[in-house]
Image: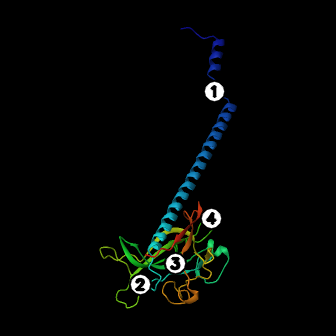
Amino acid sequence: MPRLSGKNMKNVNTNKAGFTLIEILIVTALMMIIIGVVTAVFTKSTGATEILEASTNIFKEARYSLDEIQTDLSSLDPFDGAQRFIMENGYYEKSTGEIQVNEGGGELEVHTIRGADRMIFRTSTFVGDIKQHVEVEYFLKPMMEIDGRQKRGLRTKTPLFYLMKKASVQDEKSDELIFNQQPKDSKGKLLRPEESVCENVISFNIEYLASNLLFSQLAPSPCPRGDPLGDEKGKNDTGDTAITIPQIRITLVLTDSIQEINIRPFDRVVTLVVE
């Protein structure tokens, strides 16, 4: 068997030499840079996806809620004594989340950022699986944590609410036109009188088209609880002070969740239609 000379041995050893420390450090640094870039791109892409999903979700929530209100307002009882149309100006304290009913003025923020208005009217609309003659009320209700505290956005610390819809049917045993009975479905099963239309609401504001053809805040309301419109009683239904409200504008401010990835206002002008 031939033997390798010392010169050949030296060449063999040189060819089998590994990476130097400097080469290893360079490769490691390059790998860290590549991993960092990939991670940044993935994180940015994930964040963009979350924002897109949040925007899509609150858009769906807002559209459903405003569609629901508009549908209910599309078959109102006549304003000839059978109606009880009420709009109340409300707001909530940011520190406590407590809702206040206010007939005074208030700064614009109270209406647009912390609005908690209420609206009550009589209409024919679907409740459960059948169309019914009901008195409907829309209002805000606090969203609560398991420990009893009100839910708040993590970023702005703003209280969060449900937009609720309450439906009551007429008391057939009463001689007066009173709606205080729980609705039933087509099979006679009692339905829940209140249901959530949407959640993570930050503000619910109602304006009415005034005689000057401008939308006005409910400060004060032309039809408060003490003097409903359409019952043919009180100053807003009789004499020189009688009023009509052809349109209202509803503004909802929603967020996607307590994470508050996206916060957006949505508004819709609704024409009041008498059935």
Q: Dot 4 lies on which element?
A: loop
Residue 121 shows up from this direction: yes
- Front-lying residue, 83 or 87: 83
Gap between marks 2 and 3 measured at Cα? 15 Å
Outermost residue toward the top in this view: 2
Quarter where residue 24 is shown: top right
Give the residue drawn at x 37%, y 76%: 132
Gap between marks 2 and 1 measured at Cα? 90 Å
Quarter where residue 19 is shown: top right
Residue type at mark 3? Met
**Any mark on residue 179, and which?**
2
Q: Tell which circle, 2 or 3, labels the residue nearer the N-terminal end.
A: 3
Residue type at mark 4? Arg
Q: Check contact, mark 3 vs mark 4: CB within 8 A.
A: no
Q: Check contact, mark 2 vs mark 3: CB within 8 A.
A: no
Q: Dot 1 lies on which element?
A: loop
Between marks 2 and 1 in the image, the one whose residue lies nearer the viewer: 2
Q: Which residue is mark 3?
A: 119
Q: Which residue is mark 4?
A: 155
Gap between marks 3 and 4 measured at Cα? 30 Å
Residue type at mark 2? Phe
Q: Check contact, mark 4 vs mark 2: CB within 8 A.
A: no
> Could you say where residue 6 lies in the image, as x and y percent from the top left?
65, 12
Q: Residues within 10 Å of mark 2 (few under 14, many from 20)?
A: some
**Any mark on residue 18, and which?**
1
Q: Tell which circle, 1 or 4, labels the residue nearer the N-terminal end.
A: 1
The C terminus, quarter of image: bottom left
Gap between marks 4 and 2 measured at Cα? 42 Å
Q: Dot 3 lies on which element?
A: strand
Q: Check contact, mark 2 vs mark 1: CB within 8 A.
A: no
